[in-house]
Image (tube, rainbow, N blue to C red):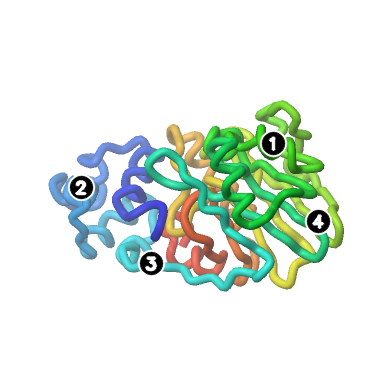
Amino acid sequence: MLEDDFTYVVRKALKGLALSPGEAALRAGLVPAEVTALIDGRFSGSVARKLAPALGLDPAALEGHPGYAPKPQLLHTLRRLDIPFEDGQVNAWLLREDDVTLLFDTGFSPDSCARALDAVQAFEIDATFITHGHRDHTGGLPEIRKRSREIYGPAHDSLPGVKPLRPGDSIRTGALTIHAFDLAGHCAGALGYRIEGLTRPVCVVGDALFAGSIGGCTGPDTYATALNNLREGVMNLPDRTLLLPGHGPATTAGEERKGNPFLA
C-alpha cells in the first residue's frame, strides 16, 4: 500500500504552491466543488487530468495514481524493517552484504527498534546512516548506539553521538561506498544515500520521496527546494535504481519517472 493516496498528492501540491482549492479550480477551468470532491476522496480521472497542470503535476500520473503499485525486485541482502509509528509505520532499511551490515534510520523508539532488529538477528551493525532528524527516524538511536560501531547523519541536525555528514561526503565500509547528497525540502538538512558496490544501484531517500508522492513541505520555498533536489539527485539515476523511502514500499527511479505525479 502506498504511503500517500491521491488526496495527499493533491493537498501537498496545493500547500507547496500556496493555492486554495478555489484558486486551483480557476486555473484548471473547473468548479471549486470538483476540486473539493477530489480532496475529500471522491476520485474522478477527468477532474484529476484537468487539475494536474494547474498544480504542476503530470496529468497521466495523477489520473492513474489510484492504481499505481510499483513492484521493484529487492536485493536478497536488503530487508525493510516495518516499525510501528503512532497509527502508522516507519521504515528502517537493513543491508547485509558479505561481512558488512548497514542500517538506514532507526525507527520511532528504542523498544520498537530493538524488537525489529532482534527479529532479524541484527545484533551488531557496522555503520548506521540517518536521513533526517525527525523523531520517527531517530527515536531508536539509544538502542542503536549500543549496537552500531559508527553512526552518521546530517551535520545540520547535530544529533548526540552521530558523526556529521554533508552533501558530497562519502563513507567506505567493506566493499561498499555510501555517498551522501542533498535531499533537503521536507526537512532542512536532510540527506539521501547512494550505495555503490552492490549488484544494482540503491538509493536511500528517507522522507524526501515516497512511492507515488513526496514528503510534505511547509510552503513554496521548501517545496521548490524539495522538487529541485529530487530531480537533480534522484531522477537522474538509472531506471533500475532501487529507491528506499522512509515510509511505504520501495520503488525504482524508472517507476517514479512514470507514476509519480510530482516527478513524471
Name the secondary structure under disc 2: loop
- Relative to 204, 37 lies left or right: left
State which tag comes first along the sequence, 4 or 3: 3
Res 91 visible = yes
Type of residue at label 2? Asp
Type of residue at label 1? Pro
State which tag comes first along the sequence, 4 or 2: 2
Q: Residue at x 21, y 58 (%)?
A: 43
In this figure, which residue is indicated by the disc labeled 1? 154
- Relative to 82, 239 lies left or right: right
Rounded to the nearest whole Å, what is the CA distance between mark 4 and mark 2? Answer: 45 Å
State which tag comes first along the sequence, 2 or 1: 2
- Relative to 32, 178 lies left or right: right
Q: Is residue 210 above or below residue 221?
A: below
Mark 3 surroundings within 10 Å by alpha-carbon count, few (fewer than 14), some (14 through 19), many (20 or more): many
The x and y percentages for residue 256 are: 49, 63
Mark 2 surroundings within 10 Å by alpha-carbon count, few (fewer than 14), some (14 through 19), many (20 or more): few
Camera-side residue of 190 and 102: 102
Q: Residue at x 32, y 50 (%)?
A: 54
Type of residue at label 4? Thr
Rounded to the nearest whole Å, what is the CA distance between mark 3 and mark 1? Answer: 32 Å
The x and y percentages for residue 144 are: 69, 39
In this figure, which residue is indicated by the disc labeled 4? 177
